[in-house]
């Protein structure tokens, strides 16, 4: 096994060179400041990288990732990230993004307990225990995917309950929270909700327990084939 990672460093040089060729001032601008509009709270899964799936450049999205995109109100890491993003970077959107087939969520249904990440996943496993009959009536795949969806909504709510977000809303700062889900098999993101922009909206949400009873919203999203006219507003206007 290689002791060094020369191939990765070589890829870095090639990437920096390509960026500089396309935009000679790119890195000098990056070195001065970052002004991302978005904070991404995602899963650590290696297949769901914010910049790639959003096709954003460095500098455009501030990122926090952990197993199963959990918002723990005792986690100094995520709280520091949220505070810095909201109070200093003044991001306008926080996206909690989970994904179907999440291994962290799958662990919630396992019989084994006692690993450190079982402690990490405790809010999700408690929700499962509370609604065990409902989840156990689903197929193994369905119950994982249902919990992936419910977990995203739960974490958006937990985010909305942090004093950092509440204070931002109280002082009139524009801040929108979103719950998104990613499908590995299509590469597509979907807006799952909830979308929260104020304490009032947060407080009007029904209990998370009511969401458990909804079926999996596993939409068969497909990328439609692109032809030469797609995406051109001029064509649509000409046809109207
Ligand atoms: Co995951």
Image: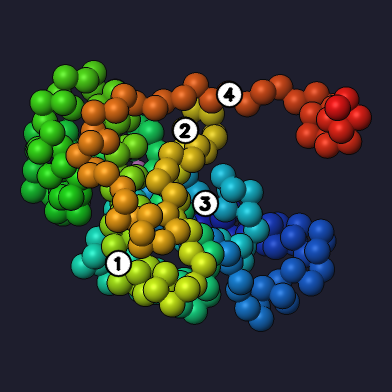
- Mark 4, secondary structure of its residue: loop
Q: Position of residue 75 (x, y in %)?
A: 25, 67
Q: How many marks?
A: 4
Marks 1/3 in contact by CB < 8 Å: the verdict is no
Quarter where residue 239 is shown: top right
- Note whether 50 is above or below 80 in the view shown: above
The span from disc 1 to disc 3 (Cα, nearest Å) is 23 Å
Crowding at dot 1, Cα within 10 Å, few <14 / some 14-19 / many 20+, comes out as some
The span from disc 4 to disc 1 (Cα, nearest Å) is 36 Å
Marks 4/1 in contact by CB < 8 Å: the verdict is no
- Residue at (23, 36) in percent of width and height: 210
Where does label 1 land, which residue? 162
- Note whether 148 is above or below 114 in the view shown: above
Task: Please state if 98 lies on the left or on the right of 31 as rendered.
Answer: left
- Note whether 230 is above or below 12 in the view shown: above
Task: Please state if 182 lies on the left or on the right of 207 as rendered.
Answer: right
Where does label 3 land, which residue? 50
Residue 17 appears anywhere in the view:
yes
Residue 62 appears anywhere in the view:
no
Front: mark 4 or 3: 4
């Amino acid at each position: 096994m290689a002791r060094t990672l020369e191939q990765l460093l070589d890829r870095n040089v090639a990437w920096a060179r390509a960026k500089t060729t396309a935009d000679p001032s790119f890195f000098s601008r990056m070195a001065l400041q970052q002004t991302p509009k978005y904070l991404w709270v995602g899963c650590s899964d290696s297949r769901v990288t914010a910049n790639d799936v959003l096709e954003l450049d460095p500098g455009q999205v501030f990122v926090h990732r952990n197993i199963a995109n959990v918002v723990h109100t005792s986690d100094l890491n995520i709280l520091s990230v949220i505070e810095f993003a909201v109070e200093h970077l003044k991001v306008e959107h926080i996206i909690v993004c989970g994904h179907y087939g999440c291994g962290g969520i799958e662990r919630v249904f396992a019989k084994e307990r006692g690993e450190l990440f079982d402690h990490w996943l405790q809010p999700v496993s408690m929700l499962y225990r509370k609604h065990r009959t409902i989840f156990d009536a689903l197929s193994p795949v369905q119950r994982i995917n249902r919990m992936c969806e419910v977990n995203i909504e739960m974490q958006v709510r937990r985010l909305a309950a942090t004093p950092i977000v509440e204070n931002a809303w109280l002082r009139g700062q524009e801040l929108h929270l979103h719950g998104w889900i990613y499908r590995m098999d299509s590469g597509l993101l979907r807006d799952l909700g909830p979308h929260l922009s104020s304490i009032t909206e947060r407080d009007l949400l029904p209990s998370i327990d009511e969401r458990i009873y909804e079926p999996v919203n596993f939409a068969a999203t497909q990328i439609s084939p692109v032809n030469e006219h797609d995406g051109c507003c001029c064509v649509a206007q000409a046809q109207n």
